[in-house]
Image: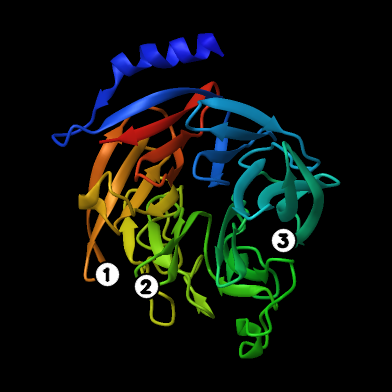
Amino acid sequence: MIKKILIYLISIFFLFNLSANSFVLEKTPIELNFPWGMSWISSEELLITQKTGEIIRVNVKNLTQTEISHKIPSIFFGQGGLLDIVTENNFVWITCSIKKGQKYTTAVYRAELKDNKLINEKLLYEALPYFDNGKHFGSRIEIFDNHLFVSIGERGKGMIAQDPSNSIGSIIRINKNGEIPKNNPFTIKKKWLPELFQIGVRNPQGMTLDPLTNSIFISNHGPKGGDFIGQVVSGSNFGWKKIGWGGTNYSGTKVGDGNAWEPGFLKPDFIWVPSIAVSGIKFYRGKAFPEWQDSLLVSSLKFRYLSILHRKNNNFIKEEIIFKDKIGRVRDMEIDKSGNIYIIADETDSNLFVLKP
């Protein structure tokens, strides 16, 4: 413990001066290995998942970490593993990739946190069908209006995201106990599975609630170009793989007819061409950075940056890079009660970082 604190104190002398506003990025002594998701369990404690299967309890005041024991059968394979996490009271919801035979899918588990252990782990949902690859699990979770919203990637299967008889390439909405809400879109869209809320996404790896509009936004990986930010709207369809949001297939060929958007599909709110490999997103609220209030924090895996997507009249208008090439592949962020931003990078032998004014 003393050694860790000394390392942390030394790191203070190597703070990154990130802009004219004199932001600093501190490397904490919290050691992480392929972290993926974070959630506050108190004003001073975070739970952090690692793709390799661990859940780490972090006290950001004392700078201590403890591993949480659990029995969730996640599989670290390809882009999969132990992925997102959200908490409410003593309950914990986790997404992960699981295995059946030689095939894999995205699953949602619920458990209770007791001391430093998860108990009463229960499988709430598994996306069907399973596939034999490790691509595009999606896997963000957001709690809103007493429901769980969960992103499911299309597992590299393209047009399956247009088939509402399965949940691959979709946003699902379920109750916190795993049951299906009676007012989901299937009551109108008779061919849709009951859990479906939105279809036509490729690999949504970010999800957050907008406190201004009470809307949920996702970040979605496009193909070669076409990453986007978009709203989760009941019964809507983002169009993958009939459209590619301005991107092309990796071979350079057109996606569908080559159109960035077509009538009948929901328009994204912001698009990147080329792709940035967008991951975690979070609307900023806090006192530390008042100029960012209600704008959107964005993480980039490919270009290894954290940015702020400014908006005006609820429209995203300009992206500002906060830092780049400082911590690796930026995966996700959380904001504390003072407005400081805690950041994780999807890297081995990594750390927890904090952005302060």
Q: Which mark is residue 127?
A: 3
Residue 266 vs residue 245, the one in the foreground: 266
Q: Earlier in the sequence, mark 2 or mark 3?
A: 3
- Amino acid type, mark 2: Thr
The reply to whether callout 1 and callout 2 are in contact (CB within 8 Å) is yes
Query: Relative to 12, is 220 above or below?
Result: below
Residue 4 vs residue 17, the one in the foreground: 4
- Amino acid type, mark 1: Asn
The kind of secondary structure element at disc 3 is loop
Q: Nearer the viewer, mark 1 or mark 2?
A: 2
Image location of residue 136, percent across then percent down = 59, 50
Is residue 326 in view from this perspective?
no
Residue 322 vs residue 338, the one in the foreground: 338
Residue at 56 percent across and 71 percent down: it is: 199
Residue at 52 percent across and 64 percent down: it is: 201
Q: Nearer the viewer, mark 3 or mark 1?
A: 1
In the picture, residue 330 is in which quadrant?
top left
